[in-house]
Image: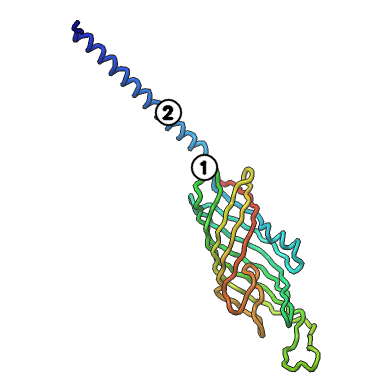
């Protein structure tokens, strides 16, 4: 039996109509999904603000190390999507003990630079896995509490002087590379950890002997200009604006 051409034409038109309708539904669904994503993106813009807090490692060290007292305030400010201005301001007091003398070093320091965040956050998050560079500068005093007069004659008892000698207006400058992580514990509250590699650029030394310790830099040795450090930070983000 021969199928009428008109009937086949009706079937083809119906199938074409169904196909086009399905395509329209898919297009509308896709557009709706894109619109939903756009609305979500608009409703949850990125946060920009000042993150400020303290270095917990210095507080803990002050509590358990009798020869050390220190505290520092750390902070960063987001200026672009992945770039942050960063700084640290602190004070330290350190007792240094050597074979022939002991001294107390006390001073303050500041470091400033920027961080680059390599972590791709989900919408609304501000976690960091970063690399940063800093320039650091410290001013301090060194008090020589007691010292032994050097001599090659071992017949007499060591000549130990108990008088205190003070050396003021000492300073040190260095460059620093920092690697770290900051993760949000609760709303706007962040816990961080970082390691620092430092290179001493210049220093003003006390007359008669070298610097033993530079606040913010760490221990100084005569044959090595490099230093290292670490930090555990607890900071709070103060949102200022969103975009």
- Residue at point 62%, 69% (across, down): 217
Find disc 1 in the rendering and name its residue: 122
60 versus 28 height, above or below:
below
| Residue 178 percent across, percent down from the top left | 55, 61
| Residue 152 percent across, percent down from the top left | 72, 93
Q: CA distance from mark 2 to mark 1?
A: 22 Å
The one nearer the camera, 75 or 196, is: 196
Find disc 2 in the rendering and name its residue: 32
Secondary structure category for the residue under label 1: loop
Q: In front: mark 2 or mark 1?
A: 1
Q: Counting residues from the N terminus, which is met first, the one under dot 2 or under dot 1?
A: 2
- Residue at point 63%, 80% (across, down): 205
Q: Are marks 2 and 1 in contact (CB under 8 Å)?
A: no
Q: Quadrant of residue 197?
A: bottom right
160 displayed left or right of 130: right
Q: Residue furthest top?
A: 1
Q: Quadrant of residue 226?
A: bottom right
- Residue at point 35%, 21% (across, down): 22
| Residue 51 percent across, percent down from the top left | 60, 52
The one nearer the camera, 65 or 171, is: 65
Quarter containing the N terminus: top left
Q: Residues within 10 Å of mark 2 (few under 14, many from 20)?
A: few
59 versus 20 height, above or below:
below
48 displayed left or right of 63: left
| Residue 100 percent across, percent down from the top left | 73, 83
153 versus 171 height, above or below:
below
Q: Residue 178's mark?
A: none
């Amino acid at each position: 039996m021969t199928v009428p051409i008109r009937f086949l034409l009706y079937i083809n038109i119906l199938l074409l109509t169904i196909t086009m309708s399905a395509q329209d539904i898919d297009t509308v669904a896709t557009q709706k999904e894109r619109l939903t994503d756009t609305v979500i993106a608009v409703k949850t813009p990125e946060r920009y603000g000042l993150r400020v807090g303290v270095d917990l490692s210095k507080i803990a060290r002050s509590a358990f190390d009798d020869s050390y007292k220190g505290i520092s305030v750390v902070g960063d400010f987001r200026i672009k999507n992945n770039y942050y201005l960063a700084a640290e301001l602190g004070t330290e007091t350190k007792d240094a003990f050597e074979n022939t003398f002991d001294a107390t070093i006390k001073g303050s320091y500041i470091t400033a630079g920027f961080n680059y965040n390599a972590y791709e956050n989900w919408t609304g998050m501000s976690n960091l896995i970063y690399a940063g560079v800093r320039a650091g500068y410290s001013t301090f005093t060194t008090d020589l509490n007691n010292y032994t007069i050097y001599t090659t004659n071992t017949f007499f008892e060591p000549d130990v002087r108990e008088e205190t000698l003070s050396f003021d207006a000492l300073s040190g400058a260095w460059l620093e590379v920092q690697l770290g992580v900051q993760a949000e514990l609760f709303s706007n509250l962040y816990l961080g950890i970082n390691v620092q590699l430092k290179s001493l650029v210049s220093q003003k030394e006390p007359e008669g002997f070298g610097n033993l310790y530079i606040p913010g830099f760490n221990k100084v040795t005569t044959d090595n200009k490099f230093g290292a450090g670490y930090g555990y930070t607890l900071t709070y983000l103060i949102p200022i604006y969103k975009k």
